[in-house]
Image (tube, helix red, strand yellow):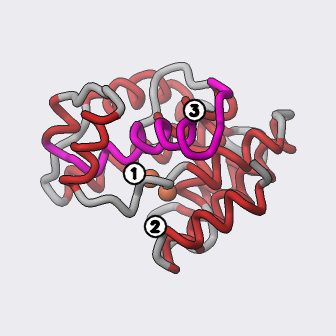
Amino acid sequence: MEVEQLRESMKSILKETRYQHVIGVEEVSIDLAVIYGCDPYKARVAGILHDCAKHLTDEELISECEQYNLSISEAEAKSVYLLHAKVGAAYAKAKYGVWDKDILNAITYHTTGRPAMSMIEKIVFTADYIEPNRKPLPRIEEIRFVAYNNNIDIAVSMILENTINYLKSIDAFIDNRTIETNEYYKKYTKVSIS
Ligand SMILES: [Fe+2]
Ligand SMILES: [Fe+2]
């Protein structure tokens, strides 16, 4: 499908603020693909589709998992919204004709990340956090700076740290995959930025 059509589909299913977020993620994904030498088309398709199941209710997410034969982890059973990532990847394939494994993985892992992500996965994970339409988050300017200045692993690590701190502060359940991803990427925070 053409990117224009994908955008139109997102505009019709998502609420306006979510759609603006999606457009922001698309733009930042293209920027980062250029900076890190990835295919900008793949990055933008993943960026446009990453939240394509975000409009579903918890009940709908669970029934779509049954429909598409997707397993539900303990973490996902506790925090059902996490499922929008894997249901989104199933939709990308079934409804939008995306077969590229890297794009599908970028959608699947955009919320928790995973250890040893591919560059496209890191790009979408980071773009989801730093796109300009998001409300201000701690250290956001610093994270943007490192992401746009050849240190995407540091950006990933800072995002994970922020996310974990935030989830702890509201006493929310933390997915084990987020913790594992943080363990994997935290070595990059040791690199000094000048
Ligand atoms: Fe999402
Ligand atoms: Fe998102």
**Mark 2 Cα-neighbour bin, 10 Å: few <14, some 14–19, many ≥20:** few
Contact? badges 2 and 1 (CB < 8 Å): yes
Whole-angstrom CA distance, mark 3 to mark 2, is 27 Å
- Please name the residue that numbered disc 3 is placed on: 104
**Mark 1 Cα-neighbour bin, 10 Å: few <14, some 14–19, many ≥20:** some
- Tag 1's secondary structure? helix
- Determine the residue positioned at 56% across, 29% down: 188
- Tag 3's secondary structure? helix
Using residue 160 as the reference point, say whether residue 152 is left or right of it.
right
Magenta span covers which residues?
78-101
Q: Residue 80's x, y, as percent? A: 22, 47
Image vertical order of residue 10 relative to residue 30, above or below: below
Q: Is residue 93 visible?
A: yes
Q: Is residue 192 visible?
A: no
Q: Which mark is residue 137?
A: 2
Nearer to us in this view, 9 or 148: 9
Q: Main secondary structure of the magenta part?
A: helix
Q: Which mark is residue 162?
A: 1
Q: Amino acid at mark 2?
A: Leu
Nearer to us in this view, 10 or 27: 10
- Tag 2's secondary structure? loop
* Quadrant housing residue 22: bottom right
Q: Amino acid at mark 1?
A: Asn
* Quadrant housing residue 155: top right
Q: Residue 190's x, y, as percent? A: 54, 30
- Determine the residue positioned at 15% across, 38% down: 77
